[in-house]
Image (cartoon, rainbow, N blue to C red):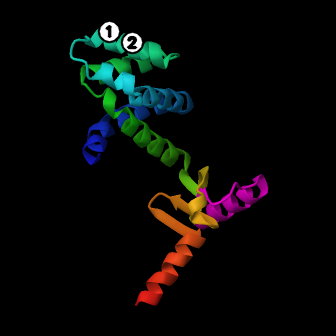
Amino acid sequence: MAENVTIARPYAEAAFKQADGAGALGPWSEAIERMALAASDPQMMDLINDPKLGEDKLADLFVGVVGDLDDTQKNFVRVLVENERLQVLPEIRDLFVELKNEREGTLDADIESAFELDDATLNTLTQTLEAKFKTKLNVSVSVNPELIGGVTVTVGDDVIDASVRGKLANMAAALKN
């Protein structure tokens, strides 16, 4: 995985530079997301790894599956195909999003909750986290009943475990010592 990130970095940086220079970070972000989803599909992975499929055919097929790409994005796909790098598109997407967030001054925040959060609670939690991290957050929420209660929040390398499961694990560890 770390090797894939190393391989993906120059492609992500090149795509970001192109998108930023054209003032098209949003459209490029959406296009790279679709590319990453297509490249992650098991059937597409079989085609990517098929040595009988020529580069031009693979590039045309991939562009057809992804759909709605401008000429620069199609050329980006062709470069990835020529260099046998389509399989690292998920890592390219992740790195591109990091660069985009850095440019926009935002961070991604993953919130796991034991229960569905209503809008008011989510807004309050988001505002509190934005004040703590002193930046705008792109929040994604998922439900994990195994937390029993509360939430866990991941922002970059920081993890805030305010779940009942986490508190019980801490109490168990304290009792063992």
**Does the stretch in magenta take in 156?**
no
* Amino acid type, residue under disc 2 in the picture: Leu
Q: What's the distance in space between the residues labelled 1 and 2, CA to CA?
A: 6 Å
Q: Position of residue 147 (x, y in %)?
A: 58, 64
* Amino acid type, residue under disc 1 in the picture: Lys
Q: Residues within 10 Å of mark 2 (few under 14, many from 20)?
A: some
In this rendering, the answer to whether 98 lies above or below 171 is above
- The stretch of residues the image draws in magenta is 112-132
Q: Position of residue 171 (x, y in %)?
A: 51, 83
Q: Which residue is mark 1?
A: 57
Q: Which residue is mark 2?
A: 61
Q: Is residue 8 left or right of residue 32?
A: left
Residue lying at 74% horizontally and 60% vertically, measured from the top left: 121
Q: Give the quarter of the figure containing the C terminus.
A: bottom left
Instruction: Please name whichever residue, 177 or 158, is drawn nearer the observer in this view of the structure.
Output: 177
Q: Residue 128's quadrant in the figure?
A: bottom right
Q: Position of residue 160 (x, y in %)?
A: 54, 68
In this rendering, the answer to whether 12 lies above or below 70 is below
Q: Mark 1 and 2 residues: CB-CB less than 8 Å, in contact?
A: yes
Q: Position of residue 66 (x, y in %)?
A: 47, 19
Tag count: 2
Q: Give the quarter of the figure containing the N terminus.
A: top left
Say which element carries label 1: helix
In this rendering, the answer to whether 24 lies above or below 172 is above
